[in-house]
Amino acid sequence: MAATVPRCITAEAAAALIQDGDFVIIGGNGGTGTPEALIEAVERRFLAGQGPHDLTLFHVTGIGAVHEHGLCHFGHQGLVKRVIGGHYGLQVPFMALIDGNHIEAYNFPQGVMTGLCRAMASGQPGILTHVGLGTYMDPRQEGPGSGGRMNARTTETLVDHVRLMDRDWLFYRVPGAPRVALIRGTTADEDGYVTMEHEATTREDLSIAQAVHNAGGIVICQVKRIARRGSLNPQMVKIPGFLIDHIVVEPEQMQTFGTQYDPSRSGETRIPTSSILPDPMSERRIMARRAALELCPGDVVNLGVGVSAMIPNVAAEEGIEDLITLTVEAGVIGGVPGHAREFGTAVNPRAIIDQGYQFDFYDGGGLSCAFLSFAEVDPEGNVNVTKFGNRFAGAGGFIDITQNTRRLVFSGTLTGGGLDIGLTEGGIAIRSEGRMQKFVPAVEQVSFSGRLARQKGQEVTFVTERAVFELEPDGLVLTEIAPGARLQEDVLDQMGFRPLVSPALQPMDARLFRPGPMALREAFLAQAARPRPAR
């Protein structure tokens, strides 16, 4: 029997296919790949009193632009009953439903989420992994979020501790049979074969389509344009037509939430990196520059959000982007990764692979080093980036990356809330101290386990605008202090515990605080030219 040809329908007609109580998987990653027209149509229909109600949503990571776009459109009581997601910090109105205990909510690591898409596609009951052990994902842990549950309303167990082959594992259960997929591409031919030539990422949309199709559900794909039957290059096709039930054409769909279309982010063209202007000097740029000093020639690197996402800009200014390989979770390899609304993409990428394969590489320990942010750090080197106060943003790819990378650099200001830093010639001046301590006696939630890191021999550095710390067997050790900062008043008195102070305490490099390149390329080339010691 011939495969059914998908129908082209409007976004409104697509939204009408979603029924009360449906399990809906939504594609997209941060600001890229989101089927925005479809999501907006669902919101319009709900606000018009036509439903749907009590949906179960599944999304691999944060979809939104903080207060707009993406799942921000679903921040209405009654529309969603349960959500399973990798990150929520980019969808604040929706996150309010979780914080207010209005919906059931789970947060699993981003790599686990993409693995669950493949598990659903192949009919598996879940995935077995080491990722999440010793963090709030571990159901043996006490405190908020145990087992990935995000509030008191969420009671069903979806994560189990398993002992197998003399090792501890976590088993993440498939949360049900999906009925609707909302995904996105660039071009669909008349038979529904989908390419992604204008997309900056390819994500796990194929696995999502397979999962919903194999469960007997409805797969709806938003694209920019329709092509003649059989005219697409088969090597460019990402999703075969028999998996697609309906096509929605949105000619104005944006590549990211910040860009209509940048051909240098899809690989269509390349731009000179000299055209990328340096970020303005600030405490955040100081931290990004100090973190970049931890890079080595040949490194394959992951970059997180926040300060770490500014490191590519430093690499471009220093001219070292061709001497390292920068990657982001979404599947982008090489080039200069973007931040803010362009996070998850890169200018001049060398390769764009499906996100699941990227996490296979990460979880297997393939990265040389990774750069991430912190919200809280305690004396054991535990890090919290996921829950502070009533804000439970979730892990994203943080747990996958930090548990499986030998060298880690965490960046953040020493204090928060009102901190005002001025720059002097080769140093800093603290004009106003922050109201909140970030180095605390005990973190509110363990997103990264310092104990496990020490057991595994990971190299861990904490970079702030005024001090640098290393994680040693006995705990945190202060190793560098910024010129202009006072050891007692500006560092030790601003911490909730007293770290060890290295007897070889050094000033932070004065070049960090001055505009202009720091001659990293010359240092890289000299390092690469040194003869390697004989084994």
Image (tube, grey):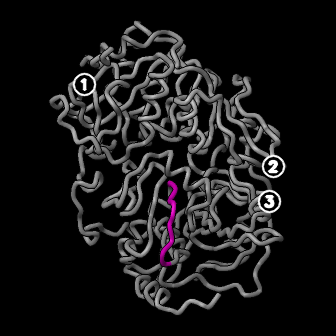
SS of the residue at dot 1? Answer: loop
Foreground: disc 3 or disc 2 = 2
Residue at the extreme left of the image, as rendered: 228
Residue bearing mark 1: 191
Residue 142 seen in the figure? no
Task: Say if the magenta span includes residue 343.
Answer: no
Residue bearing mark 2: 167
The x and y percentages for residue 526 are 46, 90
Residue at image x 42%, y 37%?
A: 28
Q: Give the range drawn in magenta.
A: 297-305
Quadrant placement of the N terminus: top left
Residue at image x 51%, y 64%?
A: 301
* Front residue of this view, candidates 213 and 185: 213
Q: Is residue 287 above or below residue 87?
A: below
Mark 1 and mark 2: Cα distance apart in space: 48 Å
Q: How many marks?
A: 3
Residue at image x 72%, y 87%?
A: 504
Residue 229 seen in the figure? yes
**Disc 3 residue type?**
Arg
Residue bearing mark 3: 451
The x and y percentages for residue 269 are 21, 58
* Front residue of this view, candidates 324 and 127: 127
Q: Earlier in the sequence, mark 1 or mark 2?
A: 2
Q: How crowded is mark 2: few (under 14 residues within 10 Å), some or many (20 or more)?
A: few
The x and y percentages for residue 243 are 38, 25
Task: Say if the magenta span includes residue 298.
Answer: yes
SS of the residue at dot 2? Answer: strand
The x and y percentages for residue 393 are 59, 41
Quadrant placement of the C terminus: bottom right
Left or right, residue 306 beside residue 340: right
Residue at image x 54%, y 71%?
A: 291
Q: How crowded is mark 1: few (under 14 residues within 10 Å), some or many (20 or more)?
A: many
